[in-house]
Image (spheres, rainbow, N blue to C red):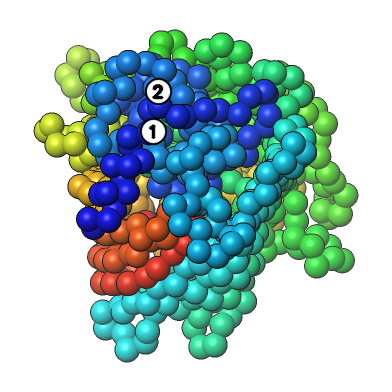
Amino acid sequence: MLNSIQTYIKLTAVLFITVSIRAGHAQSVYIPLGTQANDMMDRFDIKYPEYTRRINTTTKPYKRKDAVDFIRAANADSSTATFTDVDRFNMVYLLSDNSEWASDSLTLSKRQLLRPFYKEQADFYSFTSDEVIFKISPVFHLDYGREHGSNETKYFNTKGFEVRGSINNKVGFYSFLTDNQAFLPEYINRKRLLQCNVMSGEGWQKNFKNGGTDFFTGRGYFTFNVTKNIDVQFGQDKNFYGNGYRSLLLSDYSNNYLFLKLNTHIGPIHYQNLFSELLDYPIQSPGSNLYKKKYATTHKLDVKVFDNLSVGFFENVIFCRGDSNGVKGGFDFHYLNPVIFYRAVEHHLGDNDNVGLGMDVKYNFLRHFSVYGQVYVDEFNFNDIKMDIDTFLVRIKLRSQRSYSTQASFRNKFGFQAGLKYIDVGGIDNLDAQLEYNIVRPYTYSHYDVTYKGKVPEESYSHYRQPLAHPLGANLKEFVAIVRYQPLFPLYITVKWFDITQGLDSTGTNYGSNIFLDYETREHDYGNTLCQGYKTHIQLADMMISYQLKHNIFADLRYIYRLEKSVLHVYDLKTQYITLGLRMNFASRKFDF
């Protein structure tokens, strides 16, 4: 510990003197989702919004260049003395982790024992010239654990590599590949079976030994600038829209998918086009082993009204083209237009596709707080909304009696999120808290069989048998509480608590939680209340202590407690799971469902 402090003091002494940034408009690759760096950037955005004014925090992942640009802007301001010691330590971490954008001695290894390897702290091998930047590092994750009530050892074994760099300062590239074997707790295995034997966040897998899973993870893309204000990303990865822990618009829960992304950034305006190819696993095209393809196109417009206030608008359409036998089909070029309103196009084409609209907002204040929210609208009917408003007015006694005999139409399909982040709670440096509430109405994200032949709807808001938004689908309400604490420079403590209520189906029913079912098979048109069906209650606590031994090498101690109970008692399951692990250049996995 003493050595860590001494090293930190040396680094801090030169941090705000020697930071420099590579010149030009070279193209940056992205910080992987779920890593420690994302939490750091979110925290800095709340505490120092004047330095992050050109960073769009709502469409993630973050660019590596943006992280270093933030440090550069902070360094240029004399008020940087307000940074805590841990904040400065985290800035050194970000510099080292994104060294291609920070020409600085801080990113270099202090003792290079294995030449030519680890010349830089974050990279196993790096090469830089006027033409090429190339970095490669190993990826490793191994943990062992025990599940209460099971005699079987649980473990996760991941090994692979990560490559990134640029060519001629014009084209960026990134690749990530791992091989994985795992024996997992019962509730994760049960989720895997519900997803047609697909591991959450992953794709195809095969059985491993007796009850285990074996799968590959592959991500890769390239980036380049079209103009100073427009950049392009093409490849296979994930995206995330929002400022919360969950996203009701687009989350990182599902498997990686192929996409073309266009980012247009002009002053306070950020406009993103996302054209995606999704797989409707496990449906296969007739006469082929290929899984059936479907497509998604998305517009996301974000405006920074002020440094601390952002408003965003979202539009998405899921579509699948083919004849009555599902043989022909492909991308519908009507949706290639980057500036048109998709609902108008979809209506013009025959109303077969699944269109969603949304909005998000974030407001930072007092350098300690951030309030945020999202609204996702899958479908609504104005007359049905009037019925619900009428019922609400009677309930709060502003009207004596109801004007309509029905309410709560199935067509009112929407989700809502509200959240609060509190930085440096109670004046304790680097103690951060987050509260979040999510509700998703029945049948949201689902669709109907457009062939009317009893087939499974292909246009659900999903990819590879996993939701593209909330991991549990729809017909739910959820409370999330998160505490993050960094009491020492390399020590990270995270506690998450989830309280979820969801209405599930019994055999042959459809109450609106399963987004893969045809909503035309609903139980009734009206009277569809939140969490209708067979109520299931989930309480989950996820506690992790991580210590950074060297840059991006973490030792983890993790404990998961999960209790699931339903009125049918067929879903009841209690889990206590403890693991001890070591990971390198790898984000901890999420098991919060």
In the picture of the structure, the residue carrying the numbered disc 1 is: 15
The answer to whether residue 529 is seen in the rendering is: no
Residue 546 image position (x, y, % from top left) = 31, 58
First in residue order: circle 2 vs circle 1: 1
Residue positioned 60% across, 66% down in the render: 160
Q: Nearer the viewer, residue 555 or 390?
A: 555
Q: Nearer the viewer, residue 304 or 354?
A: 304
Image marks 2 and 1: residues in contact by CB distance under 8 Å: yes
Q: Quadrant of the C terminus?
A: bottom left
The amino acid marked with disc number 2 is Asn
**On screen, residue 421 above or below 162:** above
Residue 284 image position (x, y, % from top left) = 76, 63
Residue positioned 40% across, 47% down in the render: 36
Q: What secondary structure is found at the residue carrying circle 1?
A: helix
Residue positioned 49% across, 31% down in the render: 68
Whole-number angstrom distance, CA of label 2 to CA of label 1? 8 Å
Residue positioned 59% across, 62% down in the render: 115
The amino acid marked with disc number 1 is Leu
Residue 395 image position (x, y, % from top left) = 21, 25
Q: Quadrant of the N terminus?
A: bottom left
Q: Nearer the viewer, residue 13 or 549?
A: 13
In the picture, measured across the screen, residue 325 lies left or right of residue 125, that is right
In the picture of the structure, the residue carrying the numbered disc 2 is: 75
